Amino acid sequence: MAERRLLNQDCLTTLFLICFTLIVSSPATQAYDRPPPRSDVFTPHYGSRSDPQQVHISLAGKDHVRVSWVTKSTDVPSEVEYGTSPGAYNTSATGRVTSYRYMLVYKSGQIHHVKIGPLNPKTTYYYRCGGQGPEFSFVTPPSTYPIEFAVADLGQTEWTRSTLAHIGKQDYDVLLLPGDLSYADMFQPRWDSFGRLVEPYASKRPWMVTEGNHEVESVVPLLHVDTFKAYNARWPMPFEESGSTSNLYYSFDVVGAHIIMLGSYTKFDAGSEQYTWLKADLAKVDRSATPWLIVLIHAPWYNTNQAHRGEGEKMRIAMEKLLYEARVDIVFAGHVHAYERFTRVHDNKADPCGPIHITIGDGGNREGLAKRYLETGERSISAFREASFGHGRLRLTNETHAQWSWHRNDDAFSNIADEVSIENLGVSQTCTSEV
């Protein structure tokens, strides 16, 4: 009965927010067609109030992982027990718990975050959250090449289920998500549903995320002014470990790669805190230790789709030179609900010393695909583009070469539709001599 009352409360909360949004906001106009998307999904919680739900892990500094989960009960300790054998937990760690209210009508569960470690590389750890509930397990990233990243934005539709199933069929070490997670858009129970939807995957491998426009959640100034409230509470990333003062931008190292997650929806102009941090972070990169330099943003800087045209332009103008001079290898973006890969590019022109820009905004959003493309202008620097759902794979083979592949969702199968070998700019004598 208690669980039924909670579900009814969530439904009433969602209904209120939907009605309120219809009153205070006008529908966005679309300059492009979208084919019908697959239906939304809602993932319920079948356990008790004390059982952990929405379990996910993230990298949290050298040899450490952060375990995050939610409970309805306030009596569950923020403790993780773990070990390298099933059911044998010889180590434990405690962390912190938080919660938040949203627009007076929603109160989150208890959100627990516990940092564990030091951990050994390429090792399976078994763990339990809060001293009860099911046993989970995860595998730490390796310490040497090769390492493989899955790359996708998500949402929570039947297309998302398909994308996750395809990701899960093939092993990977870390998932990179360039913004737009739950598509809650103020309807906070969808954050809970999303956490439960991805738990079978996000509890087994580290997920590293950055925010998108659907995470802003601040469109009702009189009732709610805090941006990114749910995102920051539920998905803390290792920003402090990287010298950042904001969870909206940070960096981390893993197996020869320095990965920078930037915020498209916080200040980025010269003189801003994010710009200052990025400049300092790039200056500290040691390409002998981390030869690969990879950046994630949400709104793409290069885009031949008619959807979201020019929305990343101001950020490109502000920050592109920093990335170019640092010889960034790859820039991943989301936002546009389609796939596109560019040649190496800088300042709107093909440039062998510029990064490869890849838009991977096609994981399974509720809005459908953006299928109208330009046939002029930037088309000359676009190497491959397609409006289909899917996800990407980046395999760093060694310090000089990597393999990128885009896997198109085709119902029960995941087909490689685009593939390219990538050479590291950090070891390129031509490009390094020009800096």
Image (cartoon, rainbow, N blue to C red):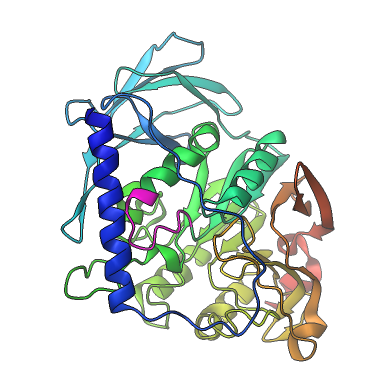
Q: Is residue 52 left or right of residue 324?
A: left
Asked whether residue 57 appears in the rendered view, the answer is no
Q: Is residue 306 magenta?
A: no
Residue lying at 83% horizontally and 56% vertically, measured from the top left:
417
Asked whether residue 109 appears in the rendered view, the answer is yes
Q: How many marks?
A: 0
Q: Quadrant of the N terminus?
A: top left
Tell which of 322 and 297 is nearer to you.
297
Q: Position of residue 431 (x, y in %)?
A: 75, 72
Task: Please determine whether, in this image, residue 367 is positioned above or below residue 133.
Answer: below
Residue extending farthest top: 88
Residue lying at 71% horizontally and 74% vertically, measured from the top left:
371
Q: Main secondary structure of the magenta part?
A: loop
Q: Position of residue 166 (x, y in %)?
A: 70, 41
Tell which of 399 and 396 is nearer to you.
396
Q: Is residue 85 left or right of residue 371?
A: left
Task: Please determine whether, in this image, residue 82 is positioned above or below residue 94.
Answer: above
Residue lying at 79% horizontally and 80% vertically, measured from the top left:
381
Tell me the quarter of the picture where residue 87 sits: top left
Q: Position of residue 340 (x, y in %)?
A: 73, 69
Tell which of 203 and 122 is nearer to you.
203
Tell which of 376 and 240 is nearer to you.
376
Q: Quadrant of the C terminus?
A: bottom right
Residue extending farthest bottom: 377
Residue lying at 62% horizontally and 67% vertically, measured from the top left:
337
Tell me the quarter of the picture where residue 31 sits: bottom right
Write the start and end of the magenta stretch as one range: 181-190
Q: Is residue 132 left or right of residue 397?
A: left
Q: Position of residue 34 (x, y in %)?
A: 64, 72
Task: Please determine whether, in this image, residue 350 is positioned above or below residue 36.
Answer: below
